[in-house]
């Protein structure tokens, strides 16, 4: 949930570090810091709050740091200790000669802290990380070898970490290691870059080494030595990154979120490209490696995911059960991993994750993999840790999503589930030809329909103005749009901090109806199809309790105008594809409300884009 960077080479380091941190801001943004090796010492600079505050601090110290060519940096999402300057990384040992930056959680930090205190270490921060700084410094004092010191310390650490370490004795040496946290090394000419993620290095080099767990790399400007936890030397595997440097530009939009919402028609086109040519041709999923025998033996599918990805998974369950008649369970990864789950070699386990880094989902996948299940990963990051665990992969190709609130990646995940469900249906022969062709034809029309929704946002903006002062918001839906209600409510909560809840409309009368009065907005996702009439009745029940009624609908029914105070209209679409069309106005509604309230839309409080802690 934090971002780390490092550089050793011949160029002035401070700008490289700060620029790298800027690319990693999505991982956290409550404080930041860098440490650079100057001629005489290691200088540490930190600031609370956004990265701009660190830039301001550095501006006052330009002359001290211009000659430094080695350093490390960190952007934090607080886990242990408040987001203050003292708790910001880099952390140092007692005398300040050794500095580290860390992403992850040191689970045994209390025991380690006690041990280090007994050895005379004085702790300045409340972080788990500081124990590691003291521990490595202690090992270094014994061995006078920084790589050895890191290796010995790693044997005592429990938990997850990506670490970048430097010592004042060593003018040109960085030591990095990782376990259950991402770390990539960029290979330049006479220089190495270290980062939690590719965007921080891609503008400098396309050559990279992904460190595996428990490996340790020792970097100087012209050498890289890689060892495993036994100290055996390994040959590093240099990969060419399939990325172009992307200017993270808002392209004239006020926020990344709005830009990303507007990218969705093209995101759908991209994901369909090469996979769905015409309604008459079969779906092509090159990286799905299920054999005919796997498919024949398959008796169950389990999908694990968190947050927005979990909502996409819920739609996926609906589709796969409907198209393929295979039972599907969906569960939040954080629940799945702490109970006795029943999976075996006849279960297909699907992990869904925008980032491919979510710790709970990675753990869930590893658990099921150990029980012999085939692992299929749906992710926006085919280079991620999760993708590397996959037996089969569906890369969603949504492009970098900067805004913390997931929008285009959600739509891309939905499209992936349509493709997967139809692919499985074709392989199993569970749908007849005309049904298959009709679904595929409808899917090919989705980009235009999404464009239509994006073309007329007046109703949505009007609603946003009317409802921006509410403290609570209820979203109701049934069937395949129940996850849409959950996702719509999540979007609103995340960026406007309004207490929004999604309910299956049939559940309203079993409790939540008690909340309704003339102050409560109830947004009904009323799409034509099998549950339309039922949802209309549920909406009437809410209206009878004086709730402020909003319809998101593609119905031309007169009753809608009588029943609802505000109506957001969307194009007609087959019921099974309505989650795509219905989601776009809900993303926009959340966006316009947050924008109207003056919230920090792209970087909402307390959140981070990648959640790499369990
Ligand atoms: O990268 P992932 O899809 O695994 O992330 C899961 C959630 O943390 C993520 O979807 C989160 O809920 C988003 N901020 C929602 O907008």
Image (cartoon, rainbow, N blue to C red):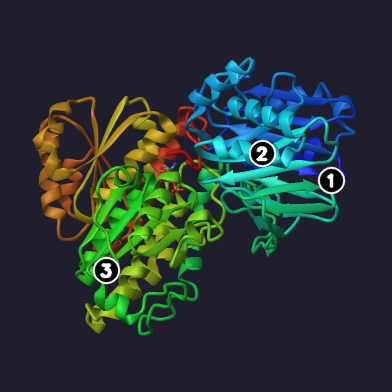
Q: CA distance from mark 3 to mark 1?
A: 51 Å
Ligand 1 closer than 8 Å to the CB at disc 1? Answer: no
Q: Looking at the picture, tell me which residue is in the foreground, 378 or 411.
A: 378
Whether 180 is drawn above or below 119: the answer is: below
Q: Residue at x 44, y 80 (%)?
A: 277
Left or right: 483 with respect to 281?
left
Whether 433 is drawn above or below 478: the answer is: below
Q: Residue at x 31, y 56 (%)?
A: 303
Left or right: 119 with respect to 67?
left
Give the secondary structure at mark 1.
loop
Q: Residue at x 75, y 41 (%)?
A: 174
Query: Ligand 1 falls in which quarter?
Result: top left
Q: CA distance from mark 1 to mark 2?
A: 21 Å
Left or right: 279 with respect to 133?
left
Give the secondary structure at mark 2.
helix
Q: Looking at the picture, tell me which residue is in the foreground, 327 or 493.
A: 327
Left or right: 206 with respect to 467?
right
**Which sits earlier in the primary sequence, circle 3 or circle 2?**
2
Which circle, 1 or 2, is nearer the viewer?
A: 2
The answer to whether residue 437 is visible is: no
Q: Residue 531 appears at what percent x and percent y? A: 15, 55
Mark seen at residue 150: 2
Q: Which residue is mark 1?
A: 9
Q: Residues within 10 Å of mark 1 (few under 14, many from 20)?
A: many
Which circle, 3 or 1, is nearer the viewer?
A: 3
Q: Residue 207 appears at what percent x and percent y? A: 72, 60
Ligand 1 closer than 8 Å to the CB at disc 3? Answer: no
Q: Which residue is mark 3?
A: 346
Q: Residue 24 appears at what percent x and percent y? A: 62, 41
**Rendering quarter of residue 256:** top right
């Amino acid at each position: 949930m934090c971002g780390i960077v490092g550089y050793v080479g011949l160029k002035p380091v401070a700008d490289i570090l700060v620029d790298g941190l800027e690319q990693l801001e999505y991982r956290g943004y409550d404080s930041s810091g860098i440490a650079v090796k100057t001629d005489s010492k290691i200088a540490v600079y930190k600031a609370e709050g956004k990265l701009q505050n660190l830039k301001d601090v550095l501006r006052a110290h330009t002359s001290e740091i211009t000659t430094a060519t080695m350093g490390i940096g960190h952007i934090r999402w607080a886990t242990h200790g408040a987001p203050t300057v003292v708790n910001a990384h880099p952390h140092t040992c007692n005398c300040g000669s050794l500095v580290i930056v860390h992403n992850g959680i040191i689970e045994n930090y209390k025991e380690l802290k006690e041990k280090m205190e007994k050895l005379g270490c004085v702790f300045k921060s409340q972080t788990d990380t500081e124990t590691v700084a003291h521990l490595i410094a202690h090992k270094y004092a014994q061995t006078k070898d920084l790589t050895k010191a890191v290796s010995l310390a790693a044997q005592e650490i429990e938990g997850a970490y990506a670490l970048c370490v430097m010592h004042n004795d060593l003018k040109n040496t960085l030591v990095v290691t990782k376990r259950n946290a991402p770390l990539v090394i960029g290979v330049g000419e006479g220089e190495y870059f270290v980062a939690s993620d590719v965007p921080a290095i891609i503008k400098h080099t396309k050559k990279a080494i992904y460190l595996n767990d428990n490996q340790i790399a020792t970097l100087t400007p012209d050498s890289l030595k890689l060892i495993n936890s036994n100290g055996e030397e390994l040959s590093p595997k240099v990969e060419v990154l399939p990325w172009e440097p992307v200017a993270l530009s808002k392209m004239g939009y006020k926020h990344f979120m709005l830009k990303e919402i507007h990218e969705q028609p093209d995101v759908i086109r991209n994901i369909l490209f090469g996979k769905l040519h015409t309604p008459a041709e079969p779906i092509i999923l090159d990286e799905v490696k299920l054999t005919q025998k796997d498919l024949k033996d398959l008796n169950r599918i389990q999908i694990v995911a968190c947050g927005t990805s979990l909502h996409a998974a819920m739609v996926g369950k609906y589709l796969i059960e409907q198209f393929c008649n295979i039972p599907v369970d969906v569960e939040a990864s954080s629940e799945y991993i702490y109970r006795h789950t029943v999976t075996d070699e006849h279960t297909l386990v699907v992990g869904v994750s925008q980032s491919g880094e979510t710790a709970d989902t990675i753990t869930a996948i590893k658990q099921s993999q150990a029980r012999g299940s085939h692992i299929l990963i749906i992710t926006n990051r085919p280079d991620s840790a999760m993708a590397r665990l996959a037996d089969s992969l569906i890369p969603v190709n949504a492009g970098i999503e900067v805004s913390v609130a997931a929008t285009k990646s959600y739509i891309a995940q939905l499209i992936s589930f349509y493709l997967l469900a139809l692919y499985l249906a074709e392989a199993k022969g569970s749908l007849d030809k005309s049904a298959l062709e009709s679904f595929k034809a409808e899917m090919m029309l989705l980009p235009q329909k999404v464009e239509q929704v994006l073309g007329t946002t007046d109703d949505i903006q009007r609603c946003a103005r009317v409802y921006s002062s509410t403290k609570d918001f209820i979203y109701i839906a049934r069937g395949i749009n129940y996850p849409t209600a959950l996702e719509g409510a999540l979007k609103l909560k995340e960026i406007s901090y309004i207490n929004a809840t999604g309910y299956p409309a049939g559940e309203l009368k079993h409790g939540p109806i008690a909340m309704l009065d003339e102050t409560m907005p109830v947004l009904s996702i009323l799409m034509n199809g099998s549950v339309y009439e039922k949802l209309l009745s549920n909406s009437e029940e809410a209206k009878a309790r004086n709730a402020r009624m909003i319809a998101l609908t593609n119905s031309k029914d007169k009753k809608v105008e009588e029943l609802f105070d505000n109506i957001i209209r969307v194009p007609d679409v087959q019921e099974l594809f309505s989650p795509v069309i219905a989601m776009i106005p809900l993303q926009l509604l959340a966006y316009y409300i947050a924008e109207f309230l003056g919230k920090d839309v792209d970087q909402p409080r307390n959140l981070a884009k990648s959640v790499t802690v369990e």
